[in-house]
Image: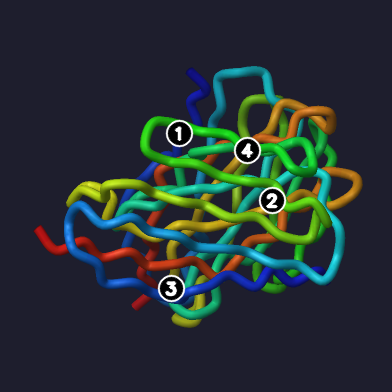
């Protein structure tokens, strides 16, 4: 089975803190994604990566950056957390462009105080 | 970007009833995916559809890829309490670097 894991299920941070959310997949997938999910707004794409060291902005990249130094790991960084970044963050991966099935991690619920 | 319109937004049904939800798009998709999300968890892939007209089952779940490639349906037969959750449809962009999601159908099942 494909496994996508996220470093924390719940995280509480203070405004202005730098926050790292880690995602690891164990199936050698090429493409990885970061979404945030908010009530009434659905899943919104923050960033995605199609290869090591490659990244592309999604629909809402402002206030976020990402890092992909190794194929299995995709990190989301909040440089200076703000209260409006309180959300559920979901990581996902797919094997490659010829495979359409996107697999999700369990999510990290981040609260910024 | 592309929009996926999913309906209904929520459903309250009795255990044992059948459920139907659908997703439509203004653009063609080559793949339709259906996910279920339990409270506080990430979405889990239920069914993937790859061909127009395709009908695929996974236990009590059946999904169809519309002939026009602009819609898809998910049916759940004989619902049980553990079917409670949010169901999402999704489709990839033409280069598979982006996925579009419906807004979700929240299913509530009364025992």
Which structural element holds mark 1? strand
Closest to the observer, B107 or A71: B107
Q: Decide: is B1 above or below B59.
A: below
The residue depicted at 44 percent of the width and 81 percent of the height is: A83
Q: Which residue is mark 2?
A: A66
Query: Label 2: how many residues lie within 10 Å, few (<14), some (14-19) or many (20+)?
Result: many
Q: Quadrant of residue A77?
A: bottom right
Q: CA distance from mark 2 to mark 4?
A: 38 Å
Closest to the observer, A40 or A33: A40
Q: Which residue is mark 4?
A: B55
User: What x and y, as percent, mark residue B101?
Assistant: 64, 61
Relative placement, left or right, of B69 versus A17 is right
User: What x and y, as percent, mark residue B70?
Assistant: 78, 60
Q: CA distance from mark 2 to mark 1?
A: 17 Å
Closest to the observer, B10 or A100: B10
Foreground label between 3 and 4: 4
Query: Label 1: how many residues lie within 10 Å, few (<14), some (14-19) or many (20+)?
Result: many
Asked if disc 3 and disc 2 are in contact, CB closer than 8 Å, the reply is no
Q: Which residue is mark 3?
A: A86
Q: Which residue is mark 1?
A: A5
Say how many tags the image has: 4
Relative placement, left or right, of B79 versus B68 is left
Q: Are marks 2 and 4 on the same chain?
A: no
Which mark sits nearer the N-terminus, 1 or 3?
1
User: What x and y, as percent, mark residue B3?
Assistant: 74, 72
Which structural element holds mark 2? strand
């Amino acid at each position: 089975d494909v496994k996508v894991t996220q470093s924390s299920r719940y995280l509480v941070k203070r405004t202005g803190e730098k926050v790292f959310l880690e995602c690891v997949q164990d199936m050698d997938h090429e493409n990885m994604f970061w979404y945030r999910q908010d009530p009434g707004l659905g899943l919104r794409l923050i960033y995605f990566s199609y290869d090591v060291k490659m990244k592309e902005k999604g629909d809402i990249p402002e206030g976020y950056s990402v890092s992909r130094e190794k194929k299995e790991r995709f990190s989301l960084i909040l440089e200076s957390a703000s209260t409006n970044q309180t959300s559920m963050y979901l990581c996902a991966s797919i094997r490659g462009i010829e495979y359409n099935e996107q697999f999700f991690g369990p999510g990290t619920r981040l609260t910024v105080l | 970007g592309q929009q996926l319109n999913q309906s209904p937004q929520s459903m309250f049904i009795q255990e044992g009833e059948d459920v139907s939800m659908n997703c439509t798009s203004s653009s063609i998709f080559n793949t339709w995916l259906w996910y279920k999300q339990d409270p506080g968890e990430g979405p889990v892939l239920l069914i993937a559809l790859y061909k127009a007209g395709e009908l695929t089952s996974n236990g009590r779940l059946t999904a169809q890829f519309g002939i026009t490639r602009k819609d898809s349906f998910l049916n759940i037969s004989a619902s049980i309490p553990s079917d409670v959750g949010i169901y999402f449809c999704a489709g990839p962009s033409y280069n598979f670097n982006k996925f579009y999601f419906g807004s979700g159908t929240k299913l509530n099942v009364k025992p």
